[in-house]
């Protein structure tokens, strides 16, 4: 079983739609959680950290459920520019190693 | 300010050859990481440096892979006797002091072994 599991997609949605991505992780000792965005042939970039209380950044909302070892990302009012791969990421290895999911591909269409 | 830089951006080599990939972290960042990303997969951890020392090299796949950071800044990932399966994007990241600090990634080196 992979340490971080995501549905690879692709998710094809119309502009303006709301889309949700889910992720599960297996290591209960994981300490910090993130969503990274990766554009085609580019490096991953931090989108947002994820906290148990839930956190929001504009159109993006992230949620963590430690009991279920489950992380989510909600994107409201999707834009064409949101098209990318979204990577669920967990900090493990004594707090220094990022473990990535395979990524979920999002395509926002007109 | 300048971000993480990596050179070369692309490297094509033949099976059995030796390659070196270079990473220049963000100035002042003491933590440096190497990851490898294969097509359709997320990045996989290779090695973590804190200053000049390799604090965690548990992700290096075998003894053909080695990395150094002699002065605590620039790092070089070295791959001996390359194999076709080594073909991937090699990503370097740095962070201020390690731990939960945000890791900033460089643009990567795409390695192709023919």
Image: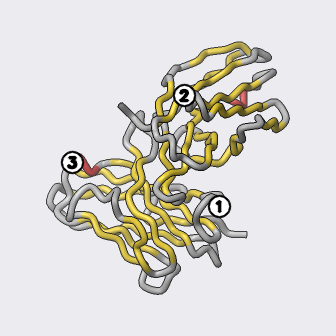
Residue highlighted by disc 3: B84
* Residue drawn at 81 percent across, 21 percent down: A77
Residue B16 seen by the camera: yes
Picture coordinates of residue B10 (x, y %)?
Answer: 40, 56
Reading the image, the residue beneath label 2 is A104
Name the side, left or right, on which B88 lies relative to B104: left
Q: Is residue B67 left or right of residue B95?
A: left
* Residue beneath disc 1: B101
Q: CA distance from mark 2 to mark 1?
A: 24 Å
The vertical placement of B99 against A98, above or below, is below
Q: Are marks 2 and 3 in contact (CB under 8 Å)?
A: no
Q: Secondary structure at mark 3?
A: helix
Asked if labels 2 and 3 share a chain, the reply is: no
Identified at 29% across, 69% down, the residue is B66
- Residue depth check, mark 2 versus mark 3: number of the one nearer the observer: 2
* Residue B7 position in % (x across, y down): 46, 66
Q: Quadrant of residue B16?
A: bottom left
Q: Are marks 2 and 1 on the same chain?
A: no
Label 1 SS: loop
Residue B99 lies, in percent from the top left, at: 59, 62
Residue at image x 45%, y 59%?
Answer: B9
- Cα distance between the residues tagged 1 and 3: 34 Å
Please identify the quadrant where the N terminus of chain B is shown: bottom right
């Amino acid at each position: 079983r992979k340490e971080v599991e995501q549905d690879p997609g692709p998710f094809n949605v119309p502009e303006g739609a709301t889309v949700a991505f889910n992720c599960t992780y297996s290591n209960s000792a994981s300490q910090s959680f993130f969503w990274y965005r990766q554009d085609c042939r580019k490096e991953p970039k931090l989108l947002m950290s994820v906290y148990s209380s839930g956190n929001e950044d504009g159109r993006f909302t992230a949620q963590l459920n430690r009991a279920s070892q489950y992380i989510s990302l909600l994107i409201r009012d999707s834009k064409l520019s949101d098209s990318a791969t979204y990577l669920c990421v967990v900090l493990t290895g004594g707090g220094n190693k990022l473990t990535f999911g395979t990524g979920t591909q999002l395509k926002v269409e007109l | 300010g300048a971000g993480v830089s990596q050179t070369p951006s692309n490297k094509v080599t033949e099976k059995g050859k030796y390659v070196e990939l270079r990473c220049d972290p963000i100035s002042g960042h003491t933590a440096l990481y190497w990851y490898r990303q294969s097509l359709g997969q997320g990045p996989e951890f290779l090695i973590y440096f804190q200053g000049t020392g390799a604090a965690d090299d548990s992700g290096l796949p075998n003894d053909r892979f080695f990395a150094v950071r002699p002065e605590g800044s620039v790092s070089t990932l070295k791959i001996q006797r390359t194999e076709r399966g080594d073909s991937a994007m090699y990503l370097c990241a740095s962070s201020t002091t390690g731990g939960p600090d945000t890791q900033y990634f460089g643009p990567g080196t795409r390695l192709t072994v023919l």
